[in-house]
Image (tube, grey):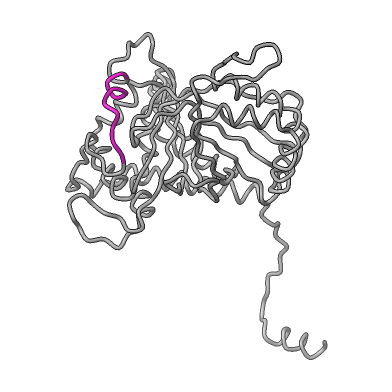
Amino acid sequence: MPNAIELQESAIEAPYVIKIETIPLAKRLALILVFCLAAFQLAAQTPSNSTSEPEVDLGELSFGTRNEAQWKRMRTVAETEDGEFLMVNLMKFRARAKYADGRETNLTGEQANALYSPIKFIGQIGGGIEYVGRVNDQIGNLNPRWDEVGIVRYPSRAKFFEMLDDPEFEKRAVHKDAGLEVSQVLVTERVPWKLSGSKRIADQDDAFIYAQLLKYRKSVREATENDANKTRAGQASMEAFDAATETLLQSLGAKPLLKTRVKGTLIGDGRSWDEFRMLQFPSVAAYETYSDSLQKMPDAVKLKEAAIEESYVIMIETMPLAKRLALSMAVSAFAPQEEGDKKNKKTEGP
């Protein structure tokens, strides 16, 4: 294209022509994390304009009823018996935010809840965000239909209440109250759950997490040849189901992410629950194979059906590595320093 080359040469007086490297995905993610961390630190250093915000009464929440017995147990637990726990939050947002003081707003419930953003407060007490993600689907007709799941790790009950008693946190909580239509807030403790020798299968774009909130029957009658009147706890029946389906899950590359025992419902609708679990499938196809295979395992299905009195079954999004790292770094930015770190900083020269 001689004419095009002549046009370029006649246009440029003195060019620099250089070859520069591309930005790898890992580097781009690292830069995003750095900017996110800087933004969180700046937010922490910027004077808050929320001093005029009314404080929310944590005993009179619009999105659920506080369990006074559970509240008291957590407030009065002995220091020697206190320890780490996970708070599981199932959330349904209002279509339009509704503030208790009657202010006018164009915010959706989800947008109002985003203003609540407790990252700073969780970091200050040494906590962490284990998971947060959208609900893509929900199986069954049980209401409400949840929008989001959040799981927060707290170092102790005492630290949890230290956060709640922070006046700045109380002011921020008005946005959560305005944004949520209904919520289940569950005090849980992690229990071991893993599959030995699981087949490693790479996650596909449609990978998802199969999450269950379960209430077990107190007792299940077993119809056996030797003893037709034998009974066992619903939880034990579910454990038998898990054992019966373990090989199947292994072959499909399913990954147990979390299993917790529910110690109590802190905020809810009066119902009690026993367990929350999260199982990740590498693809929708893997889950469909699992579901189809269960139809050929009637004895296992009977164990599960007999075990569960009530349940929520929800399909939630996976948590990408970049999101996990960003949340971890953001929370860590506000974490209390160890005494050794403080001393080292004091002795450091210019």
Q: Nearer the viewer, residue 304 or 158?
A: 304
Q: Is residue 315 above or below residue 297?
A: below
Q: Is residue 298 above or below residue 3?
A: above
What span is colored magenta in the figure?
Answer: 64-73
Compared across the picture, whether 200 is left or right of 345 comes to right
Q: Quadrant of residue 83?
A: top left
In the rendered image, residue 91, in percent from the top left (x then y), is placed at 41, 44
Q: Nearer the viewer, residue 205 or 32?
A: 205
Residue at image location 33% in from the left, 50% down from the top:
179
Residue at image location 57% in from the left, 30% down from the top:
258
Q: Is residue 72 magenta?
A: yes
Total marks shown come to 0
Residue at image location 30% in from the left, 29% down from the top:
67
Identify the residue at the far bottom of this view: 3
Q: Is residue 256 above or below residue 19?
A: above
Identify the residue at the far right of this view: 1
Identify the residue at the far top of this view: 80
In the rendered image, residue 34, in percent from the top left (x then y), is placed at 51, 45
Q: Nearer the viewer, residue 172 or 109?
A: 109
Compared across the picture, whether 323 is left or right of 124 comes to right
In the rendered image, residue 32, in percent from the top left (x then y), is placed at 54, 50
Q: Is residue 4 above or below residue 122?
A: below
In the rendered image, residue 207, in percent from the top left (x then y), is placed at 66, 46
Q: Main secondary structure of the magenta part?
A: helix
Residue at image location 22% in from the left, 61% down from the top:
104
Q: Is residue 159 magenta?
A: no
Quadrant the N terminus occupies: bottom right
Q: Nearer the viewer, residue 350 or 192?
A: 192
Quadrant the C terminus occupies: top left
Q: Quadrant of residue 201?
A: top right
Compared across the picture, whether 173 is left or right of 309 comes to left
